[in-house]
Amino acid sequence: MNLINFQLKAIKELLECMEDDSVREIVLKSPTGSGKTIMLTHFMDEYTKEHAKTVFVWLTPGKGDLETQSKDKMDKYIHNAQTKLLSDVMTCGFEENDACFINWEKLTKKGNNALKDSERTNFLEWIEKALNAGLSFKIIIDESHQNFTDKADAIVQLFKTDKIIRCSATPIVDKKAKLIEIAEEDVIAEGLIKKLLVINENFPQTIETDNQTWYLLEHALKKQREIKSVFINKGIEVNPLIIVQLPNNSDALCDSVEEYFATQGINIENETLAIWLSGRHENIGNISANDGKQIAVVMKQAVATGWDCPRAQILVKLRENMDETFEIQTIGRIRRMPEAKHYGNDTLDCCYLYTFDQKFTAGVKAVLNKGALDGKDVFLKNEYKSFTLTKEQRTTVTDLRDPRKALLSIASYFKSTFGLTGNKRENQTRLETAGFVFSDSINTYTQSGNVATLADLKKGELNTVTVKETVNTHKLGRDRHHSIGVIGREIGMEYKYMQTIIGKLFGEKFDYSAKLLSLPTRELYAFIINNVDLLRRNCREAMAVQLLQGVISPDMVSMKEFTLPRVCKFTYDGAGKIQTESVKNVYQGYLLSAEPRSTAEKKFEKYCEKCVSVDWIYKNGDKGDEYLSIVYLDNGNRQKLFYPDYIVSVKGETWIIETKGGFDKAGNSEDIDIFSPKKFEVLKAYLEKYGLKGGFVRFDKNSDELCICTGNYSDDITSESWKLLDEVFHYDI
């Protein structure tokens, strides 16, 4: 399977921490649904390929059979993975390259046989045998926030490890540990988890009901049927699941839930209702399948850990007095996307919470921040239903990395940077001049000499000693693999592709017409290992070079009519002190407390509301067929879609506006989008093609004004490219 950018970055950081002798504990903070197990299994595979005598021990908490689930996933993701459970270890011990998945509570629980002397070699003796054989244990503690006690820590100490990786969506982070944190925004951007959690959608200000439980279930079921209808219309076989979470000691409440669902034809008998409670498991089989028959499942604490059902999309929360960590884990169960991608439809790309538990709602909002919002449907005003533009959509989707493009980019960069030509002997001389080492041996360095004090040592008066080791391709296979892996991870390229790229550019056994060098196998090994840092840096810089914009052929773009969506799933901050309705917005009931919004978007919306020249304003979506999009190519010749932020009518003329990060008081750019210049040119071409107006709007902190660029794009706020938005929008016609 293809790893995505944030996963590759996390693996890279994990491997770098493993090489850092100053780091013993590593904390991987990974949101639920980000593919934590995928990342860790690929990390273990890469590390064992590069380091001999290694054994990974993956420890899990007791509930949910997590150790078996994790082992099964590694067997699935990593071909020929050498995985074991505790029973396998007790039979044959630890071996090089093992990945052992062990439930730590099976080792710490009273009455357990694993640590007792018996006819078999016990667990402690297997550890001692492994250590005596020179094996090195590396420990992974999964769901590290769950029940990790001093007894569990005592187990970890037995392995005498120098590296411990703790992972959780809600970890407890020690100050001495190295934190690797995966941003929730990155996981959302890649489509693995839902864009937003919508809380109590379309609830009125005052609710009158005879039965609070039935009220919540009614709204949840209505939403489930709406989502299912959208899936059916799109031809997608996903049956969205409602999770009903009960408080403890709630038999009467469980009866009430079952009674309501029975009135709707949802029951145990027809297998549309599942029960997952202590001592009562009904209709649980196949519940995780996207097309599972179950419409709702009633659960208690089991929902929090060790349960993976990506089609779960709606949570009815009837529980009270939960701690914050447990709340986050619970919400994570409805945030996964069923097919690990967004559908470009707000109804499908959001998840939904229905609850009267104020403490729970406040806790969720505090943790998810702008990822958890109040929501309602707002409807398009009649006078804007006839408005149309032309939107562009992709006819082919090629989002995979392009090794061929990377090869061409690296070759081009080396040629231009070092003046390389078709003369390979001359190329070697030029690269040697630039600091590259050419040898048939592996060079390492140490120092020798005498010092009397630490001050003398700091003066650097010792002699540098070069240690040359003759290349043995069999012996140095791991070192070569490690070096290629380091280079590949620097540019987000898988090992197999990076190996081919380096071979084609520098090795004699790889066919490539534009080869830069032609090194025999032994010399290529030495070249890669001796120059790993130089190769890594130059490959990274090669990827950053601005390439020429590719030409989009007509068959790559599909032109369709764009109309303003009749209904908008509007999310807002219900806790905001000011809830002002926008008069200028095309939707009835649109509030200026709309979220999520960037600072620039908030300022622009408020500006338009007050500006007399603005007739109306529409906030465009950022993904989906129903929104205005423009096709462009990135530097890897991949088709991408640009969704401008706003369509605005100014004195009867249509403007398309993109807002970006502003300028600080010193005039420095705060725009983090590296594609801004490219997007600006794409927007400019679109505006010229259809006779429209528009540009990029950014906030200038020095003047405290919004500024607009409509001609030639510049990152210099003092240039003539930037005008005050107020002056431009108040033009005379």
Image (cartoon, rainbow, N blue to C red):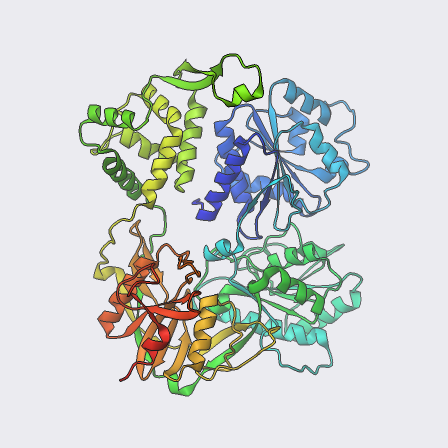
Q: Residue at x 56, y 59 (%)?
A: 335
Q: Residue furthest bottom?
A: 383
Q: Quadrant of residue 702?
A: bottom left
Q: Residue at x 30, y 63 (%)?
A: 719
Q: Residue at x 22, y 56 (%)?
A: 551
294 vs 469, nearest the viewer: 469
Query: Is 693 above or below relative to 406?
Result: below
Quarter of the image containing the N terminus?
top left
Q: Quadrant of residue 477?
A: top left
58 vs 311, nearest the viewer: 58
Q: Position of residue 548 (x, y in %)?
A: 24, 51
Q: Residue at x 48, y 62 (%)?
A: 237
139 vs 715, nearest the viewer: 715
Instruction: Give left or right: position of 729 versus 324.
Output: left
Query: Is 698 above or below relative to 437?
Result: below
Q: Position of residue 596 (x, y in %)?
A: 51, 67
